[in-house]
Image (cartoon, grey):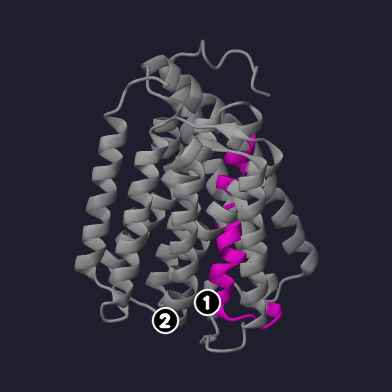
Amino acid sequence: MGDFPGFDGLPFWINGLIVLATFAMIGFGAHWVVEAAARIAKRFGISELVIGLTVVAFGTSAPEFAVTLISAFEGHGDISVGNIVGSNIFNLGFILGGCALVRAIPISPTLLRRDGTVIGVTTILLLGLIGWDLRLDRYDGALLFFMLIAYLGYLFRQRRAGVDDEHEPDEHGVQRATSLGWDSVKLVVGLICIVGGSHFLVESATAIARGFGVSEWVIGVTIVAAGTSAPELATSLAGVIKGRYALSAGNVIGSDIFNMLGVLGLAGMLHPVDIDAMARVSLAALCGMVFLVLFFMRTGWRVSRLEGLALVGIAALRWGLDLSTRVSG
């Protein structure tokens, strides 16, 4: 698929329109995936926090999953890994911080102590694995993916202990009576939109990068990351507005965990990639963002509006620094 003719030769404005169209396509697909998956999960009596950390997080991470795997197989290692690093920074800065600006977000001690520990350890591990040799190989991927399986197993063993299970109203779209067949159709159609949109997003974004002399790492960590984070933004913002704080915060943390352990783990196992040296700086920035978020969560067991403003400001600064780097890799 990487030799799809014409993208490098297309005018910038056409590639730009393709990128915008794929954002919409990916967002539409992820909306259907999340909606169908959350309905199915609710039927099994799983708590809102666990749904946010698992089912919804997996659904909203589907664009990152598709873009990362497609990029890896097409030889765009920098976009593959940069998309995950950039998406995680975007999630914690713009999405969690932006949602806190709308309304301060209460934090469950369970979320911080259990899931916060996982995301903190995982981020440090990722910095060591990739920062050491600038390569994501099969051994790295297997380790990350094994950690995801262990985390999910622990989550579902503990799903009825220490987690508030708030039932969502009909307007949230999870408890309405719908047929399993219709939910399955929406799930499949949503995944098709995500995978198809992700392919064209990678092709056009790569063409733009080459045309402007911007490295693929920068494109992956900024533009592609923002596009694939659209589902997390929509889901978390809707959760905060409707007072479903556990789902909103759990979606952000869970998506970041899925991105690092699941997406990069599977990508590394299937197709090892080499990565730009700029990855070390971006991974260090991600580590700093993760531990700042965990600190904010512990201060009063909430993320306040002021703390949200700080997160948005830091993410914007990071984005500006990345975009200002125009040296092609």
Per the image, the residue denoted by label 1 is 49
**Is residue 176 at least partly visible in the picture?**
no
Query: 124 or 309: which is nearer to us?
Result: 124
Residue 109: where, in percent of width, then height? 41, 82
Per the image, the residue denoted by label 2 is 108
Q: Is residue 125 above or below residue 45?
A: above
Q: Regarding mark 1 in the picture, which secondary structure is present there?
A: helix
Report the residue that reaches farthest toward the right: 181
Q: Quadrant of the C terminus?
A: top left
The boundaries of the magenta stretch are 43-70
Report the residue that reaches farthest toward the left: 306
Mark 1 and mark 2: span between their CA atoms?
Answer: 9 Å
Question: Which circle's residue, 1 or 2, is located before the other in the chain?
Answer: 1
Which class describes the residues within 10 Å of circle 1: few (<14), some (14-19), or many (20+)? many
The structure residue drawn at horizontal position 39% and vertical position 32%, both measured from the top left corner, is 218
Q: Regarding mark 2 in the picture, which secondary structure is present there?
A: loop
